[in-house]
Image: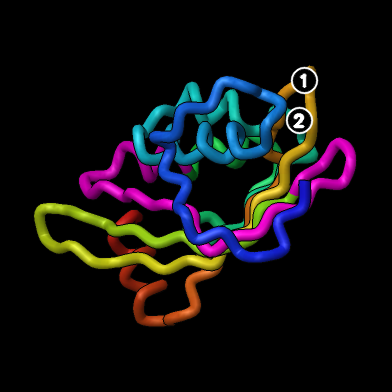
């Protein structure tokens, strides 16, 4: 599977996916876990080996699930709520690995404020026991003011 033309239909986590071999099922599972603040489902989405790496605006570079988990714990337990969807993406599958490259849009909502998020995102998954497990995530917020605002809101 290689999608050359960017897909605009967002992945939100509300998709009905039943085939764990489908890369879209892994992406949908991630967004269901993230938007639902479901740490157990998030752990099931990530490869639990030391090879997993996350590089994002909130945690810097984290290696292995033991370092990645606290970043999600902080996001999920915060007073504000963060929800995002994945869109404008392409998928490339190469054997036992697939890459999803695109954008996330969403919002951070708290008692104090609400603001929109715009994040460039790459996720890499590898096949494990017939399903896909995330081994890498990189997210970037281009606007330095938005980045500072998001970091302050989630910390």
Query: What residue is at 89 percent from the left and 40 percent from the top?
Result: 95
| Residue 114 percent location from the top left of the image | 18, 62
Q: Which residue is mark 1?
A: 130
Side of 55 relative to 21 (left or right): left
Q: Which residues are magenta?
A: 72-98
Q: Nearer the viewer, residue 102 or 42?
A: 102
Q: Residue furthest front?
A: 5
Q: CA distance from mark 1 to mark 2?
A: 17 Å
Residue 135: x and y in percent read 72, 41
Q: Are marks 1 and 2 in contact (CB under 8 Å)?
A: no
How packed is label 1: few (under 14 Cα within 10 Å), some, or many (20 or more)? few
- Could you say where residue 71 lies in the image, as x and y percent from the top left? 48, 44
Q: Residue at x 49, y 78 (%)?
A: 142
**Residue drawn 82% across the image and 42% down it:** 97
Element carrying mark 2: loop
Q: Is residue 90 magenta?
A: yes
Q: How many marks?
A: 2
């Amino acid at each position: 599977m290689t999608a050359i033309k960017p897909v605009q239909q967002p992945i939100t986590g509300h998709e009905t996916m039943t085939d764990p071999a489908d890369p879209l099922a892994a992406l949908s599972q991630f967004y269901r876990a993230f938007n639902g603040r479901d740490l157990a489902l998030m752990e099931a989405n990530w490869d639990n080996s030391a090879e997993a790496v996350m590089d994002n605006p909130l945690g810097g570079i984290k290696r292995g699930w033991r370092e990645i988990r606290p970043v999600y714990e902080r996001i999920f337990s915060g007073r504000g709520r963060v929800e995002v969807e994945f869109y404008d993406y392409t998928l490339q599958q190469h054997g036992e690995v697939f890459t999803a490259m695109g954008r996330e849009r969403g919002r951070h909502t708290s008692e104090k404020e609400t603001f929109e998020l715009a994040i460039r995102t790459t996720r890499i998954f590898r096949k494990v026991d017939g399903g896909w497990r995330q081994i890498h995530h990189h997210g970037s917020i281009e606007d330095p003011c938005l980045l500072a605002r998001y970091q302050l809101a989630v910390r």
